[in-house]
Amino acid sequence: MNNTNESNNSIVPFTIEEAINESKRCLNCKKPSCKTGCPIENDIPDFINQLSKGNFGEARSIISAKSNLPAVCGRVCPHEKQCEGHCILGKKGAPIKIGKLEQFIADFDAEMKLTRENLPQKTRGNVAVIGSGPAGLTVAGDLAIQGFNVVVYEAEPEPGGILLYGIPEFRLPKDVVRRETKRISELGVNFITSCMVGQDITIDQMLERGYDAVFIGTGTALAKDLDIPGKNLSGIVQSNYFLRMVALYNDSKLNRNEVPVNEGDNVLVIGAGNVAMDASRTALRIGAKNVTVVYRGEIDTISASKIEYDGAVEDGVKFIWNSTPTAYIGDNGKLVGLKVDNANAGSEIIIPADKILIAIGSKPARRIISTTQGIDVNEAGYVITKTRPYGMTTLKGVFAGGDVVHQPATVVLAMKEAKKVVAGIAAYVDAKKLLDL
């Protein structure tokens, strides 16, 4: 089944009247805690104030000063932990719905084509960006606005990275991602797709071609396995791979039989982060009979945001807590269940399953690093960077940011880090140009 038009309660848009009425609730605090709760310190009271007056273009301009992806952030940020979680009105249980207001402004602007930046000539330097996820798009857009000529290299056929291939349609519509990447291309950013860096081109070759700096924003593409008996049985699938296959199927680029969950399957999902919630809810939408999340801890220790957990419960996902997987159970090489050490039962139990989706985290792939001499990583495989210039790796002129440097985080946290790296790249290239003179 193809649910490309499906929405959930978190992304149902405001009407104009609803948006203005909601914005009028803002107290316009002298010390806005909502702003400090935002990782990129969006000027939230200012854009809400302009929205309350009906100045939609001005509201969008205020947001644009800090974010190149407002339509994305308005939909997928964990607002209850960030801006909305810090809203003073939250003490009364009714925080301003900042995410939906940001979404409204971005969508209205896109429909009416209100905002267009005054772009400088691209004479400040040449920068290559590897990856077009949140970090790569932020670096590309910010540098373009500052007068840099930017080329983004993306392995997939379309730009967008995890936004396009990892976050389900019901949380983040793909036309929204395509709209945001198109907007960044209109800033003067060029995209080279279907190009695997480390295979089709290396960082050394990029530097030889005249790029003043290279940014690595490839995220954590390598999923972690659960090393227990039976791990080679047929029917055990990484959640990231499953989500990508569904995205391609929904985009009519794959046949239904290539999606690794069949209609009527009993599915277990191991893990309790946002990816686990996305995988479990997507499995139901693709036709699974039952979906159960298996987690080693209690409900209050899950890393998934509350809105994603609540959405999974609402969709019908079941949960088994305090259960540590000890072995996959098979029959003639085919998966039939999962053995877990269940603390509640005080013993091991076997949970039947046709498919198991693993969502226990990911780490950076080594394809790019292994084809470039001089880029150091730590024991976990994350790229080591400096603070001056911010984000530079141990190889001169090569920078990195986002999940490839830190543990996997949210879209907006990747953007926060990327913005700091932008300043480092700009300072480095400016100094390089000055010294070359």
Image (cartoon, rainbow, N blue to C red):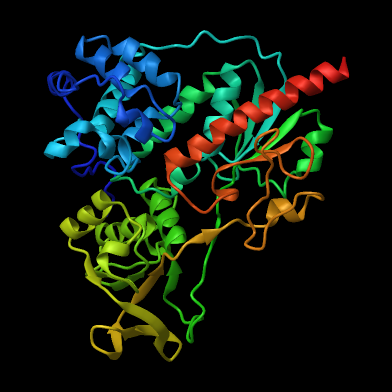
Residue 428 x/y as whole percent: 73, 27
Quadrant in the rendering for residue 313: bottom left
Residue displayed at 29% across by 76% down: 322
Give coordinates of residue 171: x percent, y percent. Answer: 30, 44
Whether residue 80 is situated above or below residue 52 in the rendered picture: below
Image position of 375 with respect to 398: above or below: below
Query: Would you say residue 188 is visible in this rendering?
Result: no
Residue 127: where, in percent of width, then height? 69, 28
Quarter of the N terminus within the rendering: bottom left
What is the tally of numbered marks visible in this picture?
0
- At a point 47% along the width and 82% down the height, the residue shown is 233
Q: Is residue 226 left or right of residue 19?
A: right
Q: Quadrant of residue 25?
A: top left
On screen, residue 2 versus residue 220, left or right, reads left
Q: Indicate left or right for 96 with 132 as reference.
A: left
Nearest to the observer: residue 171 or residue 435: 435
Q: Is residue 245 above or below residue 269?
A: above
Is residue 169 among what the camera can see? yes
| Residue in the image at 24% along x and 49% along y | 307
Q: Is residue 326 above or below residue 8?
A: below
Residue 351 rendering spot, x and y as whole percentages = 28, 83
Q: Residue at x 47, y 85 (%)?
A: 230
Quadrant location of the C terminus in the rendered image: top right
Which quadrant of the view contains residue 419?
top right
